[in-house]
Amino acid sequence: MRRESTPASILRRAPTAKHRLEQAVGWLLRGATYLVLLCGALIFGDIVWKGAKTVFQPTAPFINVAFFTEAPESLYVFEHAGKKYELGDRAYRAFTEELALAAKARGEAPPAIKAESYVYSAGGIFPNIVGTALLVLGAMIIALVLGVSAAVYLNEYARPGKFITAIRLAIMNLAGVPSIVFGLFGFGLFVVFFGWNVSLLAGWFTLAFMVLPVVITASEEALKAVPKSFREGSLALGATKWQTISRNVLPYALPGILTSSILGIARAAGETAPIMFTAAYVVRDQLPWQGLAKWTDFFFQGVMALPYHIYVVSSKIPQNEYTERVQYGTAFVFLLLVALIATASILLRNRLRNRYRW
């Protein structure tokens, strides 16, 4: 027996004004999303395209090793014997000394060189990379210890009430405080009151306090996601409250806690104002572990940092084609460093997620 098929046009509703409005709103939201993604892609693409010209080079070893291993220097641009030179500060001094010695050997006066100098346009950013990595890692360790401890108390020990509600409200409000306020807070408390001066320790605690709201909120949500039966089963077997939390709750909440660390890294690494007041120097000759009288001095050393270096090179010195190379090259390396730390956190989170399944 042949079955008659119903035409699709009969089952289809006639579009109404309400449906057309819904479709228009949907396309508007979709277009806004794609526009945001496009703007982000253009910004990152511009940084990668221009920054790669500084980081990479067409000849072996195909990577600008000096940019990763040297400290920032002034650039000297000049012409000598019909040839144009672009030399960093150390190379320029060696070059002029060599010319002076050669002229002295011939019994002549040293040649006059008219060079134009450009601050921070030569050398590399190795001290900035080291300082940024130290600041981010130290701040995240402090933030995770304090944040997870606070989340455990709020979710596992605290009894619901007005006081706990006020604490949660304060944490949410703290997340909206501008970074410049955290910088002034860190300067007043850690640099001046505690007498830590501009140092790694002051920068660590300032950045840690800044990302604490994100870490506490995400960690508390991760603890809430662990089934209540895990706690009840452990307690029924005679385990103490802390044994239950440390062995049956925290391990299963670790993936969510590491998610909070990823969000915290993205904010802590990119902040300029807090470290400008508490931890960062424009120029520092030595790395934090060099020239120490005792090992504890390491924590009281100021550092150079990538976001502060970008700020100084972009706004505090005259702009030209040479400073532009440093700006985009530093921004490109900065994105790579943040992506590397975040990727490591994601891989660790996925590994823990596969290990602790329920």
Image: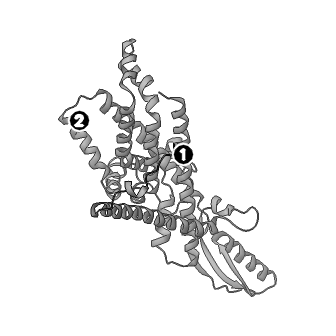
Relative to 236, does residue 38 appear above or below in the rendering? below
Q: Position of residue 241 (x, y in %)?
A: 35, 20
Q: Residue at x 24, y 44 (%)?
A: 169
Q: Is residue 314 left or right of residue 67?
A: left
Splitting the image into 4 quarters, where does residue 163 fall?
A: top left
Structure colour scheme: one colour
The outermost residue toward the front is 1
Q: Which residue is mark 1?
A: 293
Indicate the amino acid at tag 2.
Ile
Indicate the amino acid at tag 1.
Ala
Q: Which residue is mark 2?
A: 164
**Mark toward the start of the polypeptide (2 vs 1):** 2
Q: Secondary structure at mark 2?
A: helix
Q: CA distance from mark 2 to mark 1?
A: 46 Å
Q: Nearer the viewer, mark 2 or mark 1?
A: 2
Q: Residue at x 35, y 51 (%)?
A: 186
Camera sees residue 211 = yes
Relative to 280, does residue 121 appear above or below in the rendering? below
Splitting the image into 4 quarters, where does residue 100 fall?
A: bottom right
Splitting the image into 4 quarters, where does residue 144 fall?
A: top left
> Dot 1: few (<14), some (14–19), or many (≥20) neighbours within 10 Å?
few
